[in-house]
Amino acid sequence: MDYEEFEKAVEFFGILTRTSKKDLKKKYLKLSKIYHPDMEEGSEEKFKQLQDSYELLNKYMDSFAFSFDEEEFKEQFPSFTNYKNWR
């Protein structure tokens, strides 16, 4: 994967902010109903582009290593930070 492919995939899905794998899958399913070759607006080329973009973004999300600072961690996992032993 190169950065240009990554940018195209992100643009295809219209991702502007952080997204979860669950949200990505929802968007993929929604777009697949639009671009499937059997649908009115569909085409094999667009559907293939959708599949390739989805696979690329999934691979990226699987291999991405998160590095949280404390504030970002608290923002993303507020229930975890309610424990007594949390600094």
Image (cartoon, helix red, strand yellow):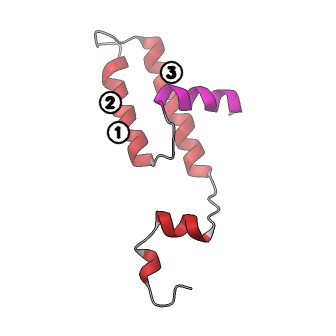
Q: Is residue 7 left or right of residue 45?
A: right
Q: Is residue 66 left or right of residue 13?
A: right
Residue at the image point whose x is 68% and y is 27% from the top: 4
Query: x%, y% of residue 17?
Result: 51, 43
Q: Which residue is mark 3?
A: 49
Location of the N terminus by quadrant is top right
Q: Label 2: few (<14), some or many (≥20) within 10 Å? A: few
Q: Report the Cα–Cα distance between label 1 and label 3.
A: 17 Å
Q: Nearer the viewer, mark 1 or mark 3?
A: 1
Query: x%, y% of residue 56?
Result: 57, 35
Residue furthest bottom in the image = 84
> Does the magenta-highlighted stretch encompass residue 11?
yes
The majority secondary structure of the magenta stretch comes to helix
Residue at the image point whose x is 40% and y is 10% from the top: 43
Query: x%, y% of residue 61?
Result: 55, 47
N-terminal-most mark, 1 or 3: 1
Q: Which residue is mark 2?
A: 30
Look at the image and give the residue range highlighted in magenta: 2-14
Q: Amino acid at mark 3?
A: Gln
Q: Is residue 26 left or right of residue 18?
A: left
Q: Report the Cα–Cα distance between label 2 and label 1.
A: 6 Å
The one nearer the camera, 36 or 4, is 4
Q: Label 1: few (<14), some or many (≥20) within 10 Å? A: few
* Above/below status of 53 relative to 67: above
Whether pointer 3 and pointer 2 mark residues with C-beta atoms closer than 8 Å, the reply is: no
Q: Report the Cα–Cα distance between label 3 and label 2.
A: 14 Å
Q: Amino acid at mark 1?
A: Lys
Q: Amino acid at mark 2?
A: Lys
Query: x%, y% of residue 37?
Result: 35, 13
Q: Is residue 2 visible?
A: no
